[in-house]
Image: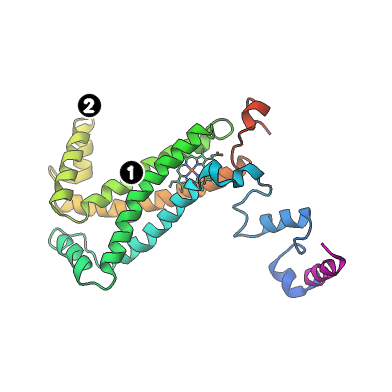
Amino acid sequence: MTTKNHSVADIITRNRVWRSIFRQGYPADDENRARAIMNSWFLHIHPVKVKLHSLKLTYTWGLGVISFVLFLILVVTGAWLMFFYVPSVQSAYTDIQNLDTAVTFGALMRSLHRWSAHLMVVVVFLHLCRVFFTGGYKRPREFNWVIGVLLWVVTMLLSFTGYLLPWDQLSYWAITVSTNIVGAFPLIGEALRQLLLGAAEAGPPALVRFYALHIAVLPVVMTILIGIHFWRIRKDGGLSSPSEASENEYGDR
Ligand code: HEM
């Protein structure tokens, strides 16, 4: 940086308004750059130092970030859909038909929600494969792998619970068949099936239960798990690296 730029940085750094918002100097040197990351609520998700190779698109293929963006799209479009959908067996089916035919942007928002849900299942699975094939599950990242497995399970459960909500023939029989599969589980199967359905067969209590799981319980669990997942990536020293295994078998830093 030129002397002139340094003096601009100095002026900014001494400014009281700047100081009241940013606790560190202008990020013109390594120390202040590190402080800028640590002190900003928006930036502190990133590790202070990033390994160069992990910025290469072909290492992660951006699959984790795409999964997260899809989750955000699902939250926004899902909240919008809630304004037009009531989880009762009398109205669920017609509410969805109205969304497709009468509500402004209804078909668009519903399609965005459905396509993002399908894509999320595919992308999260591909992300899981990427982590596996690059050895990202190895020490010290075993715990984050376990959090990842839970994220995969919650992704599948969100998909499963959302499938019942249109209350058409496809959803009704899909839920009947899949809860029957749960019922075939030894010992606790039947109890689990009845717990899911809230009755002996799919009906009004099942719709309310699946709705509550789909719009409240599972999204909250997902949000908490994603928070831990991101925090853990930072605490595990950023992303795994291809050289890590050969440098140190146990990945200790
Ligand atoms: C909602 C689902 C998920 C989201 C939003 C998510 C997000 C992310 C993001 C943004 C990263 C940073 C690197 C990248 O973009 O690839 C990452 C890394 C990682 N994820 Fe996920 N993830 C999800 C599911 C999973 C699953 C299903 C697994 C494995 C079972 C997993 C295991 C990991 C591990 C171990 C890392 C660190 C990898 C490394 O250091 O190379 N994640 N995740």
Residue lying at the far top of the rendered structure? 249
The quadrant in which the C terminus is found is top right
Residue lying at the far right of the rendered structure? 3
* Magenta highlight range: 1-13
Q: In this view, does 80 lie to the left or right of 56?
A: left
Find disc 2 in the rendering and name its residue: 186
Q: Which of marks 2 and 1 is nearer the N terminus?
A: 1
Find disc 1 in the rendering and name its residue: 156
**Residue ID at (64%, 48%):** 47
Q: Nearer the viewer, residue 236 or 239?
A: 239
Q: What element carries label 2?
A: loop
At which x and y percent is residue 120?
38, 49
Q: Would you place residue 214 above or below residue 17 in this image?
A: above
Q: Would you place residue 98 above or below residue 164 in this image?
A: below
Which mark is in front, 2 or 1?
1
Q: Which of 101 and 169 is in front in this view?
A: 101
